[in-house]
Amino acid sequence: MDEKEHQRRMDELDNMAKHLAECIRSRDIYEQRHNTTEDVALTGLLKLCSAVVQHDPPLKFIKDGQEFLEDVFNILFALPTLETRYLPKSKSRASRLAAYDLMTELVKGSNDNYQQLHGRMLRQHTPGKHPQYPWNYWPSDDGRASCGFVGLTNLGATCYMASCVQQLYMMPEARAAILNSKITEPDMKHLGILKELQKMFAYLQESEHKAYNPRSFCKVYVMDKQPLNTGEQKDMTEFFTDLISKMEEMSPALKDVVRSLFHGVITNNVVSLDCPHVSRTLEEFYTVRCQVADMKNLYESLDEVTVKDTLEGDNMYTCSQCGKKVRAEKRACFKTLPRILSFNTMRYTFNMITMMKEKVNTHFSFPFKLDMYGYTEEALMPDSQGTEPKVEDTNKYVYDLIGVTVHTGTADGGHYYSFIRDKIHRKEGKPDKWFMFNDAEVKHFDPTQLASECFGGEMTTKTYDSVTDKFMDFSFEKTHSAYMLFYERCETDEITRSKVIPNIDLSNDLSEWIWKDNMQFQQDKNIFDHAYVNFMWNMCSYIPSTLPEPKQVQLMAAQLSTTFVLETLIHAKEKPTMLQWIELMTKHFNTCPAACEWFLDSMANDDCWPMQILIRCPNQIVRQMFQRLCVHVMQQLRDRHAPLYLHPILDEDEDIDIPPEEIGNYSCVTRFIKRLLSIIEHGSKPHFKHLTEYFSLLYDFARMGESECNFLLSIEAITIMVNFYLGSKAPDYVEVVSDDDQDDDEEEDDVVSLSEEKYRPASLEKMIALIATLVEASRGEKRQRLVLAQSDFALLTGGKGFPFLYQQIRDAINIRQTCNLIFSLCRFNQRLAEQVIGMIFTAITKMNAEVAQPFFKLLSMLVEIPGGPPGMPPFTHLVLQRIWEVAECSPQQCLDWLAAQTPRNRIAHTYVLQHLETWVEHFLIAFNNPRVRNSAAFLLVSLVPDNHFRQAFRSARSIHSPQKELRMSPDAIAVLHQIYTLLLRLLCRARQYVDSNVHGTGKLVSYFALMSYCLVSRTEKLMFSPYFTDLWNLFQPKLSEPAISTNHNKQALLLFWYNVCCDCPENVKLIIENPTVTRNIAFNYILADHDDQEVIMFNRVMLPAYYGLLRLCCQQSPSFTRQLAGHQNLQWAFKNLTPYASQYPTAVDELFRLMKLFVAKRSGMSDQDLQEISNFKRATLLCYVECLERTSCWTTLISAFRILIEDNRDRFVVICNHGLSRLTDAFNTLHMMYHEATACHVLGDLIELLAITRSVFKCARVYSEVKEVKQALYNWKERMDLARKLLSLLNAYNPDELRHECIELLKDLLLVYGKECVQNLVPIIHHAHLSFKKSPVAASGPYFPRRVQHSMLNKANIRPPRPELQMCLHHNQVEVPKGNDDSYDAALIVFFQPYHLFIDMLCRTAVNCNAMTEQIIHLSVLVGFEGIPLHLAWFAKLWKDIYNSEAVDKSCIKVLCNMPSFHEYIETVFLDERVCLSNPSINSFFCIFVPKVHTKILQNNWGTLVNTIVTSVIADRAEVDSCNPAELNIVAYRMNGDLRVVVMMCSVVKPKHVSSMLMPALKHILQVCKDYQRKRNQKAEELKSQQLEEDEVPAAKKAKLKEEGDDEEKEESEGKDKDSEGDAREDDKMSASSPQPSTSKHSDCDPDDRPSTSSGLTRQTARQTDYVDLLAKTIETALTTFES
């Protein structure tokens, strides 16, 4: 492309961009403020323009492009004006996003545009440009005052400006002139002031908010060549005069308005008395100064202004015209009066004596109407002829009061506010209203109170005098009085009525400003918006990289990103991109050192960000972010600024001490740090909540290096922090008495007691760490002496009782760093170390346990390092020497502290181990506090040098189980044995602590628990043997016999005894070989109070150990077993404890294990022993059957029957003693829990209970002829209720095991109670299936067969809403037809076949009972119909048997044939499941019954179905030609059913017409089948020969295989022959009498009755050929049928 072509295209592109820019500018506003509908055209224009600008047209880089950028900015952020209240133009999300994109494209690649937009964006987020956002900000604005006016926020001392502006604003002409002023030139004078003044007036006029913040006005307004200082009060008159003077200079129009309103002329006239000449000097004014001192009112002050003065004598006047001295009269008078006449009451005077400015508070009144005629030139000056002036109209000199500005306070400071009359909202016939404008507050004012509020003078009040007991009048000067007065010339009524308030036309800038202030929430919503944040991200990250010289704008980008994040983003509720912004800021600071310096300089000069973010921000994440950012910036500047840290302001000699305030002023880093320290020195308080990040910042700074620490030390940062911490602390410390002074100071009064109220300063951990770091960093070159400032060292170590150290320890601020601080202070200072340790122990003795915890923690840290660096005092020895002094005061804390120290401190370990004899018995056994005893036990455990042994002692563990054998070092074993031996020796002394009346019942608990814990191997268990007698004497009788319900000493002893005997037959032998022990060990007082929770918890621990010990003895001694089995206490335990398995699970388990031992038969047992076992079983069974609670002891019943029932004799006992009823009761309870409670864990118990019930009932069947059993079966009244509940468990919410047990038990019930079951169960089952047929529901339940099993989402789908029978199957619930998925077909059979066989058995039972009702017949049809998709043949077999039986009433067949549901059954098979006719039973059944019902089925579709099937068969002719063997077998499987249906239908009803193509097709298919048979047989022979040749098998074996193969072929051939014979010879014919119910499992559905979809196996191939052979025979039959 040549240059001209390129230029032409660029010109076209530029023209397009300009056109689009103009279109966007001229586009009307269509998007509404509320319920915004997107302006699609605007969005399209913005997007199109953005696409054009992407190609950088020239417009983008010229001034027009910058103006267009401004327009796009206004599209997004313009605010409503008076006329168009629908700004900004873009309000919808789509258009705003498009505008953001366009603005991004305009700025990309253009430095000028970027700088322009950067300035606009920066102003929105610069600190001070907007009020400080609250945290988690969302706009909430104050509303406009009820009077309808808006106030001005006082920024500190700007009340003078607010009063002046409000007075000016309430003048309609002035307001209109300012708001209507046009900015004609960009460089016009005072442009910024005019803009801000317009914004302010527009806000006051249109805003709905309470007040306007004039901060931006104050920033642009320059007075005395300085911007307005909002903290400095100025004179209102001076400001007013300055303001209107600037307005006069802004534009000619404003000048005219100002002059017409405020401009007046005073003439200073000198009238010569000696010549005719008059001298006049003109003086312009805007305000008239009125004297107040010595004046009563305004008229007197005006008289003083216009008073005549005679010039004579030495003061004669020199005439300018005559040139000689003459007598003259001098007078000032008003030549021209303005429309608005303003007076300045000169309330301030200068006292020449005191040389101070004072305020005049005297009374000074002024009228509501002021007549100025007497002070005009017209009234005071004669004309040239010397005549008096002629009065024409004096009304034009009358003025009305329209405003008063009041000053309250003194001459040095005070406050201004105004009273103003509203001239705009006038109501006819009513006086004008007055309002008080007091900064942000505006309210109605009663003008009758003007005198009291504005005239000044004195006021009198009543004051009570206590001396005279009277109220005295007390007068004092008012400090509030009028300072400026505003009068307006009165107009005649005609003029007033015709006067029109000027129209106000707000500019776009004013509209934008008023939108920001009037709709603050909308603007903030735009700023606190993700789209805006994304655009800001582009401005700070992406766009700078597109500029020609990105490095030039690095500082700008850094400034914009930093101010946006710190001023706006961190205040937002939602800031998901905060991390990305922090990374961007970090990147800016990494690449731009100037940005780092700007950032720190900003915070060094103004602590707004540190104070607001670091201390006051409630969000910890934000504080941490700011802290890390500051640290990162300082690290970036460290290399350049570190040499400047200690550089003073003046270069002084090194020997001269530099004041701390003069250090570190050369670096922005150190200035920032000094600013931070000044916050806690002057601004912050110790109770501030958020100080962690503040001190973390200082701490991270100190950790940067030696220069940083030296700087902090040089400015005495330690003193600042310690004073900050101790500033509000009470004198809450203890006095430390040195060893040398102990004898002198023995009185405890010298020790100040600690206050009970705890004080926990917040977030000062890093402060202590910083102090410790600085102290250590101050150590001198030889590392022995601390080089600290005198004030620092005095605050750290001085004071009575080390107040700083003591207080921070007690507050537990940062104990680790406190320890480090003590290390640093005490190195090479042994005496100081002793004093600190003394302070700690003295404090512990005076504190409670909770308060003393930090002191013990500090002790632990002090002794962590036994040796330590050089000069470190021996803290371990110092502590151990005094530890036992506080043991009696705080025994638990001391023992716990020693337990923590002994594993890691060898000195402490040796010290404690050597003094075992002195403290073990006292603290482990004799001490009354159980916590102290536990602590002593843990201390002993801690002495064993094995970590696992120590850690497991207090971890969660089963105290009933013996300790597992641990692998321990020889040293650990030696220490353990030393401790264990000491404990065993204490067994004999422990007897003195078992008297419950003296010592209670728990002093030995920790002792025995510790001994149990020490049993880590057989060695320790064998060590117990010599002390067995001591243990027995301790147990019996002092512990075993007393009737104490919860003797914890006995509990702990039994636990130890059981543990010591586990896996140690030697200790068990000591029991069983001692006659005294075996005779008395079964006697143990046990209270079985199952309502007392304390007793329950006690027995839950004690009983398992006790019965476990008895079990160990029984396992070793058969004689003891027989003795114990007959003991009354054991029978009591079986009766009273085992029924409460939920309360004592482990104990009951031990009892049942004992029961197993009692009934166990060992080899060599005598007949007497066997008889005793039999008697025990019988007695126990009777106990459980008769005594167990019927509704709650099912667990015990199952466990007991599982052990006690072994043979039919045991079952006989159960049956004859109402055992079936008891089992039914247990089943009812479990059934209820399983369905109504959340205890789904009872499923296993339910299955086991059903299995036990079934075994017992089968025994009843065996002995059914025995009288007792027959009577028991008759008396079992709950049998049908049981059957009904069993039916309710048959659904898809229960697993196969449960359904199997239910069905099998139902079958057993059916065999015994046949007719009764038919009468009770058939209605229930029939109702379930009939309801399902009428309104089928979707398959539910987790166990329903599915191709893809779904996970159980919640407990609701584990059980149905109510227990109900639901074994129905709708045909639509079958996901795929049979034959397409083998595993899915098998799952369906497993699920449904047992139930269908039960229905078959139920129907056959009804036949045998002669109870074959219509309901049962209908039930068989319903269930048979559901079994059609499964190809179940039981229904067909049932009715074939009934049909073939001679003993059955054939009327039921007639009923069957008349049932519509049976007709539906036949039709469904014919239409949908013809393949099931491959089953010989189903086929023969249809051959029998189709002729009986053919007139009632397919009445309109008989011929259609025949033709459809014939057409399908004809179509299969082409398909069989291309089939492989596997596919041919599948086609044969399907075609066989089709042909059988056609043959059957044609046999019943001769078809009118059969396609002529059918016969050739059948013959062709028959030929294909025969060809396939021939090839198959050949291939089989070849494969068999090949296998025989390859296999090295003996000839005999080969012959045997061949014989077996021939037999299989023969059987298959016979089977095929049987299938082809139809119903002539059936294998399963019923007996001649009647159909018999089947009692054994049989399958009426061969899983392989259809072809397999897989191939490759010989067995499957052989199996597949059956259907080809069967099809061939079916075709032959069909050919015969059609040919006939």
Image (spheres, grey):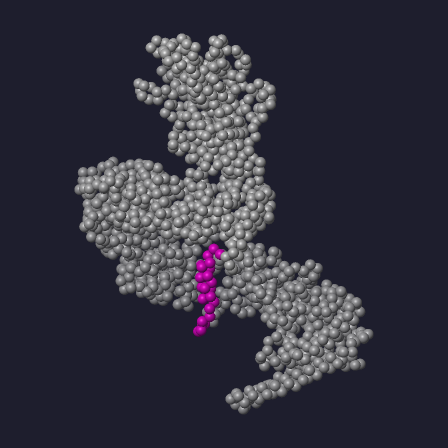
Q: Position of residue 338 (x, y in %)?
A: 49, 21
Q: Residue at x 43, y 20 (%)?
A: 283
Q: Position of residue 1222 (x, y in %)?
A: 57, 60
Q: Which secondary structure class fits the magenta region best?
A: helix
The residue lying toward the viewer, choosing from 1634 and 1380, is: 1380
Q: Is residue 868 left or right of residue 1127?
A: left
Q: Residue at x 47, y 42 (%)?
A: 137
Q: Is residue 830 left or right of residue 225?
A: left
Q: Residue furthest bottom?
A: 1595
Q: Is residue 95 left or right of residue 615?
A: right
Q: Is residue 109 above or below residue 1392?
A: above
Q: In the rendered image, which quarter contains the C terminus?
A: bottom right
Residue 978 falls within the magenta-colored stretch: no
Residue 393 visible in the displayed image: yes
Q: Is residue 1087 above or below residue 71?
A: below
Q: Residue at x 72, y 74 (%)?
A: 1512
Q: Is residue 931 left or right of residue 1590?
A: left
Q: Residue at x 23, y 51 (%)?
A: 876
Could you say which quadrant of the image residue 233 lies in?
Answer: top left
Q: Is residue 1616 above or below residue 370?
A: below
Q: Position of residue 1020 (x, y in %)?
A: 31, 63
Residue 1147 falls within the magenta-colored stretch: yes
Residue 463 visible in the displayed image: no
Could you say which quadrant of the image residue 735 lies in?
Answer: top left
Tell me where the magenta segment starts and ends, as one range: 1142-1166
